[in-house]
Image: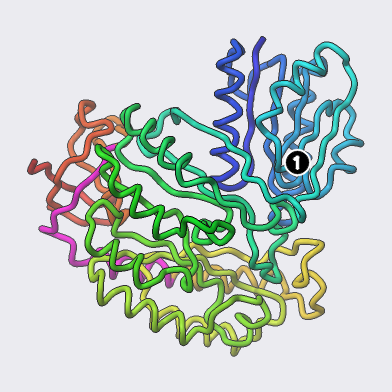
């Protein structure tokens, strides 16, 4: 039996797909590309915007056309939010939402025997269990991801994810540590901690906080680098910042979502900080970690965002001085409070604001890397092309050296010798 997977959306979805894929492999299934004809197709869906819903439906139909006789299983956030619409797509056999993914294989085996459409959607608003999923290897990757929690308690006005994923549910620290040790034993040198609300880890636990988990991870023998995928500004406690400053195992990079730099828009978004509090904490972080790279997420064209709000945001972003920004155009998501705001922004205006923010992001990035010549960085090498081998430094700079295939998955000290528009060039010194 052959099985193909297609994943839409975030790193958490990718992790969950990998865990399900391993279960099928262990049962003897052959994994094939989603572009090939397969006996089973698994589509892991996203619902972060209306467009994401449409992309999920499009991919479901595409897989069905590839092999109308195949078993088609749909899981993930869109399946959780709108299973009724998916159920009407002729050819969908299994729908399971965002819980009990560990049971997908048994559902497929059941369908092969009974040939009856199967749907199971759990009410995630009342779900308090972390579904254990494990991954032992990541194809073509040198960094390993560990999902440490699920769900979100924030309910930002533009976001549907708390309704698709439910409340914060943390993985037991023992399970996280065990998986991390297995990944290190399998040769991974860097682990990325991920979740729907990563910094919310431990909110539902009596015995462990996010800080406690970081301390235990930092003591794992052979683990060279720990990276936090994303964390909210008000979850970076003094203890966590000090731990990072005192321990080189932690990557010198933090992704801290801002979303907007305008006071009125932050309030409308229901973000849990003011821009003044955000900047104060950033300055405190840089005092303790002067070499830190800080990246962020920004939403342009949020409903009600005036020209004055946008200019306020531009000024604030410049004041913070990010090393890079991930800029998104606001995209309406039915079922969220923001979708009901009357002052939706014209698409042309949104595009213009996105372009302006992206130009500013490029300026800030070039300013960040302007003086990196002669700096020494620890680089984890990941890939090669015809001329160069590439890797990421601790602060997430992407550095290339002369091609050497033996460098794959190796951590080396590299001195930067040239910084050009075509990339950052380095030379291995040890």
Q: Position of residue 384 (x, y in %)?
A: 30, 32
Quarter assignment of residue 36 = top right
Q: Is residue 170 above or below residue 271?
A: above
* Left or right, 232 with reference to 328: left
Residue located at (58% from left, 37% from top):
132
**Residue that lies at the very extreme toward the bottom in this rendered image:** 308
Q: Position of residue 20 (x, y in %)?
A: 61, 28
Residue located at (41% from left, 53% from top):
213
* Left or right, 308 with reference to 367: right
Q: Residues within 10 Å of mark 1 (few under 14, many from 20)?
A: many
Work out whether residue 129 or residue 249 is closer to the camera in this orientation and state it. Answer: 129
Residue located at (58% from left, 25% from top):
21
Range of magenta residues: 360-381
State which quarter of the image contains the N terminus. top right
Q: Is residue 284 above or below residue 66?
A: below
- The colour style of the image is rainbow
Work out whether residue 25 or residue 404 is closer to the camera in this orientation and state it. Answer: 25
Residue that badge 1 annotates = 97
Magenta segment includes 404: no
Q: Is residue 270 above or below residue 252?
A: below
Q: Position of residue 96 (x, y in %)?
A: 77, 36
Q: Position of residue 406 (x, y in %)?
A: 20, 26
Residue located at (53% from left, 58% from top):
206
* Left or right, 18 with reference to 395: right
Asked which secondary structure carries label 1, the reply is: strand
């Amino acid at each position: 039996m052959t099985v193909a997977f297609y994943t839409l959306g975030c790193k958490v979805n990718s992790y969950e797909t990998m865990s399900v894929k391993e279960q099928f492999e262990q049962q003897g299934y052959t994994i094939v590309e989603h572009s090939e004809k397969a006996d089973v197709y698994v589509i892991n869906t996203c619902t972060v915007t209306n467009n994401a819903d449409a992309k999920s439906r499009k991919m479901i139909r595409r897989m069905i056309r590839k092999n109308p006789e195949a078993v088609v299983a749909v899981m993930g956030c869109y399946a959780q939010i709108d299973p009724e619409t998916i159920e009407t797509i002729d050819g969908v056999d299994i729908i399971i939402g965002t819980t009990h993914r560990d049971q997908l294989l048994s559902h497929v085996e059941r369908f092969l025997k009974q040939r009856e459409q199967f749907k199971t959607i759990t009410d995630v608003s009342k779900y308090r269990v972390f579904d254990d999923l494990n991954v032992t290897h990541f194809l073509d990757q040198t960094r390993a991801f560990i999902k440490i929690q699920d769900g979100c308690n924030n309910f930002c006005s533009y976001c549907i994810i708390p309704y698709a994923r439910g409340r914060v549910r943390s993985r037991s620290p023992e399970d996280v540590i065990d998986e991390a040790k297995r990944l290190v034993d399998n040769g991974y040198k860097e682990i990325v901690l991920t979740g729907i609300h990563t910094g919310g880890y431990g909110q539902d636990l009596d015995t462990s906080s996010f800080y406690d988990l970081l301390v235990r991870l930092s003591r794992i023998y052979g683990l060279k680098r720990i990276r936090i995928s994303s964390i909210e500004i008000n979850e970076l406690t003094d203890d966590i910042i000090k731990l990072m400053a005192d321990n080189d195992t932690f990557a010198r990079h933090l992704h801290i979502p801002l979303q907007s730099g305008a006071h009125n828009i932050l309030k409308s978004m229901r973000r849990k900080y003011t821009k003044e509090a955000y900047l104060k904490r950033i300055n405190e972080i840089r005092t303790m970690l002067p070499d830190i790279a800080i990246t962020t997420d920004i939403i342009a064209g949020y409903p009600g965002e005036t020209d004055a709000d946008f200019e306020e945001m531009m000024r604030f972003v410049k004041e913070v001085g990010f090393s890079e920004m991930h800029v998104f155009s606001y995209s309406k998501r039915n079922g969220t409070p923001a979708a009901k705001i009357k002052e939706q922004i014209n698409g042309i205006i949104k595009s213009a604001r996105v372009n302006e923010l992206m130009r500013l992001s490029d300026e800030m990035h070039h300013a960040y890397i302007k003086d990196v010549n002669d700096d020494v960085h620890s680089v984890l090498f990941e890939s090669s092309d015809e001329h160069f081998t590439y890797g990421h430094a601790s602060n997430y700079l992407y550095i290339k050296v002369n091609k050497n295939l033996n460098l794959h998955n190796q951590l080396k000290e590299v001195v930067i010798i040239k910084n050009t528009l075509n990339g950052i060039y380095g030379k291995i010194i040890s």
